[in-house]
Image (cartoon, rainbow, N blue to C red):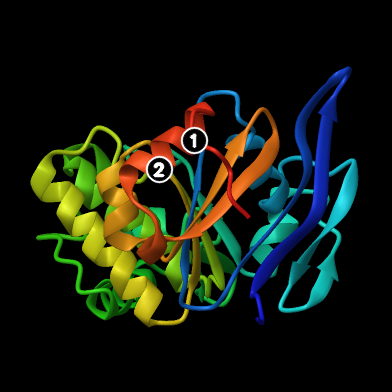
Amino acid sequence: MAYIIETRNITKRFGGLTAVDSVSMGVEAGEVVAVLGDNGAGKSTLIKMISGVYKPDGGEILLEGRQMKMETPMDALAVGIETIYQDLALAENLNVSSNIFLGREKTRRSLGLFNVLDHEYMTEESKHVLDRLDIHIPSLKSTIRTLSGGQRQAVAISRSIYWDAKVLIMDEPTAALGIAEQKKVLALVNSLKSQGIGIIIISHQMYDVFEVADRIVVMRRGQKVAERLISETNPDEVVGLIVGSETVRK
């Protein structure tokens, strides 16, 4: 099994608390793995290590078989690990294309003297990535604050894909969305999967998990307690594994 992203015995401590305890997991290209667990299970700490926010106290992270040393989130971005958190990190006062290029704006020379933002280039490139993902937003000049929750999620995903994400980490991607918009986001996840991107999803929505995931990893009190193919389990077993009432089978 060749993983595009893999953790081996990864550990993170905060003082006397072990938030993640020797967790090994992996994601193949074109696969969706859901990381599940109750609050405090260690899910967020795990993805923050993969995305460079936290430095592991033990174990290793491998990307395409190569051990990675990521000191900051920018190190993760540089190698194609993109993370979309619940708050989406979008600038609500800027338009769609400005958000797709946020922090990595394209400039051009003006009058041979000054660097100015190349809005035409950024707009055209934004159209290309939105078309690639079959995302429909009426006007790229619309500010983010005027968009629906699902459209905002789509912009955040488009930004990640434009910058050549190999691995996409999504934290509660359908939280606070209506049913119709949830379905659109899940369809987008399936589209990304078909394009060979490895995806890690954290979600409390069991329907979402069974709609898009190929495998699940269950965490409890910082440890990985189970791993299942989605085709070989059911919501009742998964809930039991999360709360500890289900016997863990090997």
Locate residue 61, reporting x and y percent. 79, 60
The quadrant of the rendering that contains the C terminus is bottom right
Q: Disc 1 marks which residue?
A: 246
Q: Label 2 crowding class (10 Å Cα cut-off): few <14, some 14-19, many 20+?
A: few
Q: Secondary structure at mark 1?
A: loop
Task: Determine the CA span between mark 2 and mark 1.
Answer: 7 Å
Q: Amino acid at mark 1?
A: Glu
Q: Secondary structure at mark 2?
A: helix
Residue 88 visible here: no
Q: Are marks 2 and 1 in contact (CB under 8 Å)?
A: yes
Q: Amino acid at mark 2?
A: Glu
In this view of the protein, which residue sits in the foreground, 247 or 119?
247
In this view of the protein, which residue sits in the foreground, 12 or 22?
22
Locate residue 228, reporting x and y percent. 50, 58
Q: On the picture, is 211 further left or further right than 118?
A: left
The quadrant of the rendering that contains the N terminus is bottom right
Determine which of the numbered discs, if any, sits on residue 237 in the image.
2
For residue 89, above or below residue 243: below
What's the residue at 17%, 40% (across, down)? Answer: 146
What's the residue at 44%, 70% (across, down)? Answer: 161
